[in-house]
Image: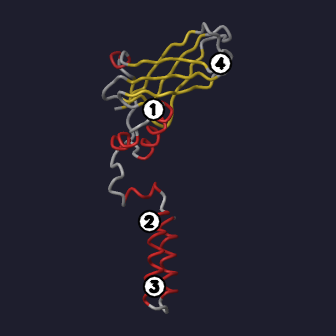
């Protein structure tokens, strides 16, 4: 869309400047060049920017410099993942040895909250986490409830990420939370 708009501006300027002196034509094209260089969206700029990251790893390394907050780091990971989407992979159940390399911490925003936050650290060196299925047993539940924790981007190898799940009802502080299944992706 941007390219079409730019081309229509160029053709309009060519038509307008065809009857003008050469110095005015140069001035018109100088302004067009300035507009093109400074107002093109960053998302479209990768093709002409030699300093832009070429892959996911470069994107992470370039953008993580000086980042000190987990929230900012997670946003950068999500952004880089969106920019350099990996080829789709086939999900599989994580092996027992792979599950042992995971650290999952749970927290509620308040004692009566219906939002459960999971901080997941993937200690595997070559496996991403695509989905986690948890089971919660609480006094407020008639039977254990299962929830799927997933998002649009996986938890990359050797990284941490916060994920959340909206619960049907609040849970008590003595609730039992158990990981039922973890889906992996290479």
Q: Mark 1 falls on what kind of element?
A: loop
Position of residue 2 relative to residue 143, above or below, is below
**Figure quadrant of residue 66:** top left
**Circle 3 SS class:** helix
- Compute the Cα span from label 3 to label 2: 18 Å
- Residue located beneath label 2 in the image: 37
The picture places residue 142, in percent across and down from the top left corner, at 67, 10
Tell me if residue 88 comes above or below residue 50 in the rendering: above
On the image, the x and y values in percent for residue 85 come to 41, 44
* Label 3, label 4: how far apart the Cα atoms are: 66 Å
Q: Quadrant of residue 164?
A: top right
Residue identifier under label 4: 110
Which quadrant: the C terminus?
Answer: top left
Q: How many marks?
A: 4
Q: Real-space Cα distance between discs 1 and 3?
A: 50 Å
Q: Could you say whether the residue bearing mark 4 is in a helix, strand or loop?
A: loop
Q: Whole-percent x and y of residue 132?
A: 48, 24
Label at residue 80 = none
Q: Is residue 73 left or right of residue 137?
A: left
Of label 1 and label 3, which has the lower sequence position?
3
Instruction: Tell me where residue 154 appears, x and y as whole percent.
Output: 43, 33
Residue position marked by numbered label 1 in the rendering: 68
Instruction: Give the mark nearer the N terminus: 3 vs 2.
Output: 3
Label 3 belongs to which residue? 25
């Amino acid at each position: 869309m941007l390219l079409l708009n730019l081309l229509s501006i160029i053709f309009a300027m060519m038509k307008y400047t065809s009857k003008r002196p050469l110095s005015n034509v140069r001035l018109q094209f100088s302004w067009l060049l300035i507009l093109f260089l400074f107002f093109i969206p960053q998302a479209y700029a990768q093709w002409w920017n030699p300093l832009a990251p070429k892959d996911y790893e470069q994107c992470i390394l370039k953008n993580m410099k000086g980042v000190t907050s987990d929230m900012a780091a997670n946003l950068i990971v999500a952004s880089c993942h969106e920019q350099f989407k990996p080829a789709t992979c086939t999900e599989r159940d994580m092996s027992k040895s792979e599950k042992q390399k995971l650290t999952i911490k749970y927290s509620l925003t308040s004692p009566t909250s219906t939002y459960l936050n999971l901080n997941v650290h993937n200690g595997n060196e070559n496996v991403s986490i695509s989905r986690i299925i948890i089971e919660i047993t609480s006094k407020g539940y008639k039977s254990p409830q299962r929830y799927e924790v997933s998002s649009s981007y996986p938890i990359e190898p050797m990284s941490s990420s916060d994920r959340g799940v909206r619960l049907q009802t609040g849970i008590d502080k003595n609730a039992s939370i158990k990981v039922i299944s973890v889906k992996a992706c290479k």
